[in-house]
Image (cartoon, helix red, strand yellow):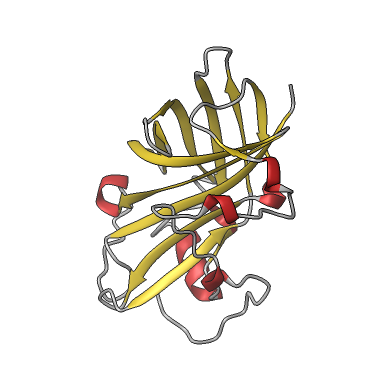
Amino acid sequence: MSEETEHDHGEHDHAGHEHDYEGHDHEGHDHEGHDHDHALIVDRLPEGAWQIDPASSEVLFKARALFGLLPVTGAFERFTGEMIVDPEGAASGRLVVETASINSGIRKRDADLRSASYFDSDKYPEMTFTLEKLEPSGEDHLNVTGTLLILHTSIPVTFPAYAIAHGDHLHLEGGVTVDHDVAGLGWAKPALVGKRVRAEAALTLTRVI
């Protein structure tokens, strides 16, 4: 991917999206103006059917370029998803992301990422995370297990996530690091993009049932 200095996506200040999922201060987190005075950090999700609200959610990626010296941060701007939590607390669901909606702030780089050399958005318009299990960890987070489908490659992943419940709203935050070779992307070009990319999501879900 080529690095340019001209940023043409001025509407999105990706440098400001710095979610620290390892040490995030959830008690002070005010997401989209919701009153969190009565919000609870939970280790068991409320029962029901939940749907992602894209307007109050983010799906980000972070990588490094120029032999690790230059951080690259961007976002996927179109995504949908849902989750079902049964009476026993077992959860299942999907997050579907449109790969062509990638926005790193540089038009030429985004075109490269959409091309057949990277996401191949024409052939693979979506990448999908399928939630298979979400369990209490005994600490302040939940353990998420699922499968990430990128191009034609299914990648099993497990990572921590944080949950805040607030009435008919549920906020989930988590992130996972993906190796390009494992994903079958073949992106590892040290001068342009690093071998690993971190995907992070901050999702607000609303109860539909």
Q: Is residue 56 left or right of residue 93?
A: right
Residue furthest out toward the top: 87
- Seen at 26% across and 61% down, the residue is 195
Of residues 139 and 142, the one drawn nearer to the viewer in this rendering: 139
Q: Quadrant of residue 76?
A: bottom right
Q: Is residue 68 above or below residue 134?
A: below
Q: Is residue 73 above or below residue 77?
A: below
Question: Residue 68, percent across and down?
Answer: 28, 74
Q: Quadrant of the N terminus?
A: bottom left
Instruction: Give the residue drawn at x 52%, y 73%.
Output: 15
Viewer-closest of 85 and 116: 85
Looking at the rendered image, the quarter that the C terminus falls into is: top right
Q: Position of residue 150 (x, y in %)?
A: 41, 43
Q: Quadrant of residue 207?
A: top right
Q: Is residue 154 visible?
A: no
What residue sits 49% from the left and 87% below the top? 5
